[in-house]
Image (tube, rainbow, N blue to C red):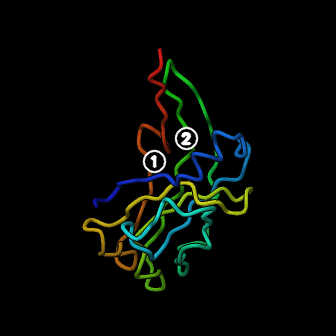
Amino acid sequence: MAAGSTKAFNDAVLKTRKGIYAEGDTWQLVFLSDTYASINTDLTNPTSASFTPVVGGNVAASYTLGSITIDRVTNVIKFDAADIGQILKNASNPANLKTALLRNATVTNDAIQAWDMTADGTTSLDLINNDFTFTFGAGGINTSTNQSA
């Protein structure tokens, strides 16, 4: 896959539709050493503990997202948040960051969505020699489009 590829967990979609998640929940970004390809989005009740987080140096255990919004414009529902701050290069930063994971910390750290952070599916980001900024795209964290008439 390529950097920025993303996939949602099936249970997250189910729980969203059942009303288990709320805009006011605590949403966090966690970085993982797991490859994007190894992330199974069909796990039952996946949490961030289902994966291997990376922590150290300037890489925090989690990044709580601020300014959460869930809006609708015509038939598009957008879930968005403010971007996290820049992670500065540091010799103590982990050398094996490959995937970003969105989790709902309010609901047992449920895994929501994953992003590929590599250029080739396997090569970790170099946070030892390079600063890093994670930015949600213009479409936000994710969007849902209703096609019914």
Circle 2: residue type: Asp
In depth, the one of 130 and 74 nearer the eye is: 74
- Does 146 appear above or below 55? above
Disc 1: CA contacts within 10 A as few (<14), some (14-19) or many (>=20): some
Circle 1: residue type: Phe
Name which quarter of the figure residue 24 lies in. Answer: top right
Mark 1 or 2 closer to N-term? Answer: 2
Badges 1 and 2: C-beta atoms under 8 Å apart?
yes
The label on residue 80 is 2
Name which quarter of the figure residue 127 lies in. Answer: bottom left
How far is mark 1 from mark 2, CA to CA? 8 Å
**Split into 4 quadrants, where in the image is the N terminus?**
bottom left
Please state the horizontal and vertical placement of residue 27, each as a whole percent of the image. 65, 53
Residue drawn at point x = 44 percent, y = 57 percent:
134
Residue drawn at point x = 61 percent, y = 46 percent:
14
Farthest left residue in view = 120
Farthest bottom residue in view = 92
Disc 2: CA contacts within 10 A as few (<14), some (14-19) or many (>=20): many
Q: Secondary structure at mark 1?
A: loop
Determine whether, in the image, residue 10 is placed left or right of residue 99.
right
Please state the horizontal and vertical placement of residue 42, each as a whole percent of the image. 50, 59
Farthest top residue in view = 149
Determine whether, in the image, residue 14 is placed left or right of residue 33.
right
Residue drawn at point x = 35 percent, y = 72 percent:
125
Q: Secondary structure at mark 2?
A: strand
Question: What residue is disc 1 on?
Answer: 136
Total tally of numbered discs in the picture: 2
Please state the horizontal and vertical placement of residue 85, each as a whole percent of the image. 53, 58
Please state the horizontal and vertical placement of residue 54, each as a whole percent of the image. 52, 77
